[in-house]
Amino acid sequence: MGQSRRGVDMGPSAFRIAGLNEKIAALGYDVVDKGDLPSPIPETKKHGDPKKKFIREIARVCDKLYQTARESQEEGALPLILGGDHSLAAGSVAASAARARGQNQSIALLWIDAHGDMNTPASTPSGNVHGMPLAALLGPEPAELSSIGGFSPTVLAEHTALVGVRNLDAREKELVRESGVHVYTMKDIDRLGVAAVMASALEAVGRGTSGLHVSFDLDVCDPSIAPGVGTLVKGGLNYREAHLLMELIAETGRLTALDLVEVNPALDLRNTTAELGVELALSALGMRIL
């Protein structure tokens, strides 16, 4: 419900069809699939506020996701959240932040995305909420998402890094600059390489934090390897760059939750994007070449 291109509701099924559960289990993990959280059908609901469309419905789903992820964490699990549009991260990241707060710590957040997702209802050109979740996590708007978990801000800017960004709205550029988050654009990756960028990002968000939540939007990858996303932007991560990024995350030993979002099978080619997502999940969870 957070974006205008229908089909992302089938994303979790596409991951399962690509063998996600079985392949994670083959790494030695115990895998429990808690199924899909129910979400309303957009065509059966009214947009509501045109500056934050379907916000009430999205907030309800995110709150349910928050509760489900918290339950998984309390069971000792690492939540792997499948999407679906990126608005869901308002719930999943809040769960990770709540866990860290319970230990008197702060969560580190890597937001890996072609877009900033830092629009607010006041700045958005479209009213699509999938462009707002990082703004909500940093607070205070949209308020319906920023308050999930009962505390705001959910994450601190100094503990947040935006990696792979290359497509920002004009006003959003100002918001990103003003936010204080650590930003690594595709130009930085081109110039320095993924290894150097990730070393800097992980060091920056790691100071004074407990655990690492990675929220990975498949549109950060180049359309040549990830065609099944709703907002294609040329010039993204290539196959090996994406895998190296995830492998470096695994090497930290700090990963506590992972979002894989914005896979749209209706726009995909032979499930290519979901299959890539599965491979990247395996790299983040410790699969090695040797």
Image (cartoon, rainbow, N blue to C red):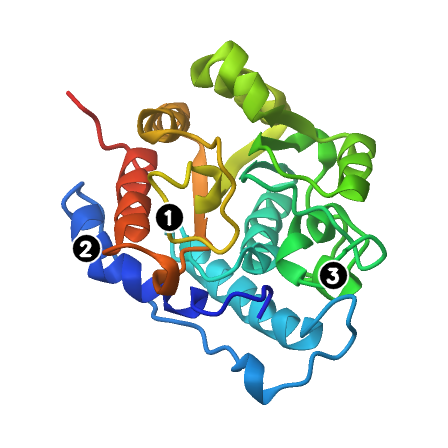
**Mark 1: amino acid:** Pro
Residue 6 appears in view = yes
Few, some or many residues within 10 Å of mark 2 (<14, 14–19, 20+): some
Q: Residue furthest toward the bottom?
A: 44
**Circle 3 is placed at which residue position?**
147
Quarter of the image with the N terminus is: bottom right
Alpha carbons under labels 2 and 3: distance apart: 35 Å
Task: Give the image quarter of residue 209.
Answer: top right
Residue 8 at x, y = what percent? 44, 64
- Look at label 3 and name its amino acid: Ser
Q: Which mark is residue 19?
A: 2
How far apart are labels 1 and 3 at the CA level?
34 Å
* Label disc, if present, on residue 190 of the rendered structure: none
Query: For numbered disc 1, what is the local secondary structure?
Result: loop
Closer to the N terminus: mark 2 or mark 1? 2
Crowding at dot 1, Cα within 10 Å, few <14 / some 14-19 / many 20+, comes out as many
Image-based side of 181 in relation to 87, left or right: right
Q: Which residue is mark 1?
A: 227
Q: Residue at x 51, y 36 (%)?
A: 212
Q: Where does residue 244 sit, x and y in percent of width and height?
A: 35, 24
| Rendered residue at 73%/57% (across/down) | 146
